[in-house]
Amino acid sequence: MQLSIATPENLAAREDDAARFDVANRLFLRLYQASNLLHKTGTRAVAGFGATTQQWAVMGALARPASRDSGLTVKELIAFLMVSRQNLTAVIDRLVAAGLVERLRAGGDGRLRHVRLTAEGNRQWAAMGPAIRAYYQAALADFSTEECVQLFRLLDRLRGSLNRIAEPE
């Protein structure tokens, strides 16, 4: 067993490690809290439409111009939303039952299915727009546009780091 001698340098390094751990711990707890509040308050924002935050996310992904016409495959939705197949399938099933999305066979490959908004889904998404916009405005009222962009960039970097951890080696 080798003993390390306490020098000013390694004491400072230990203090830096402890401080960095403390900041990281606080950051991840804050992200966890924010995630829970996003779910709680987001659900409240779209509850009048009978929607959940998960349904909001799926409909929002399908309402984007790039996916509006042909929809997305389940695999593409999983990658975009970063959710499990099991969770996504249950949400899609509920949206199909409500008549808001449909599953279509892709041309050329009968096994491949696309999911897209129905006409009713597009109407519902448009009706939800003002409530979602008001929610965003209230949630981000204390942030400038520049701060929102900075937060987006920082969260995007964190997502990239977490993706690298999540990828199988």
Image: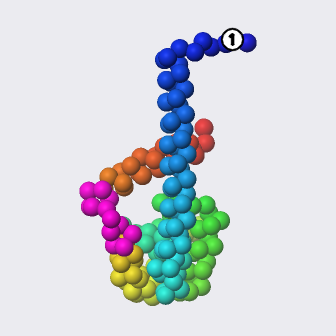
**Residue 55 x %, y %:** 52, 75
Question: Quarter-wise, where is residue 110 in the image?
Answer: bottom right
Seen in the picture, residue 152 relative to 72 is either above or below; the reply is above
Q: Measured along the vertical axis of the image, is residue 54 above or below residue 125?
A: above
Does residue 147 appear to the left or right of 81 in the view shown?
A: left
Q: Which residue is mark 1?
A: 2
| Residue 24, magenta (yes or no) | no
Q: Residue at x 53, y 19 (%)?
A: 10
Q: Position of residue 94 (x, y in %)?
A: 60, 80
Quadrant of the image containing the C terminus? top right
Q: Position of residue 52 (x, y in %)?
A: 54, 77
Tell me if 41 is positioned left or right of 69 in this view. right
126 and 140: which is toward the camera: 140
Quadrant holding the N terminus: top right
Q: Residue at x 61, y 42 (%)?
A: 168
Which span is picked out in magenta?
137-148
Q: Residues within 10 Å of mark 1 (few under 14, many from 20)?
A: few
Helix, strand or loop status at disc 1: loop
Number of on-image labels? 1
Q: Nearer the viewer, residue 164 or 147?
A: 147
Would you say residue 122 is visible in this rendering?
A: no
Give the colour scheme shown.
rainbow
Residue 30, position in %: x, y? 51, 55
**Magenta highlight on residue 145:** yes
Q: Residue at x 45, y 47 (%)?
A: 158
